[in-house]
Amino acid sequence: MKLSFNPYELMLKHTFTVSSYSRNSTPDVQVQIEYDGLTGYGEASMPPYLGHSVKSVCDFLSKVDLSGFPDPLFIEDIMEYVDSLSEGDAPAKAAIDIALHDLAGKIMGQPLNRLWGYNPAKAGDTTFTIGIDTPDVVRAKTLECAGMFNILKVKVGLDTDEQMIRIIREVTDVPLAVDANQGWKDRQKALDKICWLHEQGVVMVEQPMPRENLDGNAWLTERSPVPIFADEAIQRLKDIPSIKGAYSGINIKLMKCTGLLEARKMITYARAEGMKVMVGCMTETSCAVTAAAHLSPAVDFSDLDGNLLISNDRFIGMTVKSGRMVLPTGPGLGLQLL
Ligand code: MG
């Protein structure tokens, strides 16, 4: 197996704002693993707030030596080795994991969802995210995407929450998901807000309060009329026990959890604990977004719009038709290089 990688800056179509920062591009590293005439594609996307960089990802990938692994199908063994190389570096590990899965699917001649027994007809809808912005921009963005998606995700967490929702509701009545990105500090105010949001057709809330405030999030989950999902509070499989009971569900992202192998274990574990599961993404090309989309038949919500936010995608993969995700049918991830 031959591993290669190159930095690839993702250019955002619009400035992206959540409750804590704004940005116009996202650093990214594209990864290829070649084996027996086949190429598996992977990707590491590094939104700045997670503390990773192009340098940290390239440094990590330079340490990876796959020469001891003659068979790319033994992904458990390979990822155990890759994971042992450092404590963190989840995006770099995810890039290798995604490329290995793409390669494995190509060797087997089947799309990943099919190898896992997931029915692509159950891929369902994806949310499309509206960031925090001025009223005019929120209205314009909602008008632009209304009719194309069956559920929208709204970034909240600032004083403008009610205004944002009212503007969106002037344009569309589709169900809404909201993501506070830890922006709400007072639990009673957060609950009041969630009850109001519920009346506005909000069907789920992501990370309402800071991740350190386990009791506050648990208090909300107990009282909320809609499910509360952990995002910033959950990275990997080993984190699930520590948040049990504090949230209704978890948001699995490949860049947080080191890839598809661990993501599938997280789905199983969360289900065993009676938790809901959503799969999310960072700003990514269709490579990592499509990898996550292959998990979508197995989860409750999919938030896979990261590829739609960039102007320099490298691939065609999962597509969205009438708001529903259509998984590619080619082997592995099923990507076409643009
Ligand atoms: Mg989130």
Image: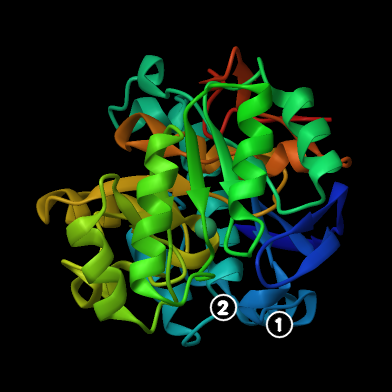
Q: Amino acid type of disc 1?
A: Ser
The relative height of residue 99 versus residue 51 in the rendered view (above or below) is: above
State the quadrant of the N terminus.
Answer: bottom right
Number of other residues with Cα within 10 Å of mark 2, as a class: few under 14, some 14 to 19, many 20 or more: many
The relative height of residue 110 versus residue 310 in the rendered view (above or below) is: above
Residue 47 found in image quarter: bottom right
**What label sits on residue 313 in the rendered view?**
none
Q: Is residue 191 or residue 244 the one in the foreground?
A: 191
State the quadrant of the C terminus.
Answer: top right
The answer to whether residue 247 shows anywhere in this view is yes
Percent across and percent down for residue 190 are 40, 64
Residue pictured at 31% horizontal, 27% vertical: 118
Disc on the earlier residue, 1 or 2:
1
Give the structural element (helix, strand or loop) at label 2: loop
Percent across and percent down for residue 110 are 44, 25
Percent across and percent down for residue 168 are 65, 33
The answer to whether residue 310 shows anywhere in this view is no
Residue pictured at 74% horizontal, 77% vertical: 53
Residue pictured at 48% horizontal, 24% vertical: 125
Q: Is residue 283 or residue 15 the one in the foreground?
A: 15
Residue 106 left/right relative to 160? left
Percent across and percent down for residue 91 are 59, 67
Q: Which residue is mark 2?
A: 89
Give the structural element (helix, strand or loop) at label 1: helix
Residue 299 left/right relative to 29? left
Q: How far apart are the alpha carbons under marks 1 and 2?
A: 8 Å
The relative height of residue 41 versus residue 120 in the rendered view (above or below) is: below
Residue contact between numbered discs 1 and 2, judged by CB atoms under 8 Å: yes
**What label sits on residue 56 in the rendered view?**
1
Residue 257 found in image quarter: bottom left
Number of other residues with Cα within 10 Å of mark 1, as a class: few under 14, some 14 to 19, many 20 or more: some
Q: Amino acid type of disc 2?
A: Asp
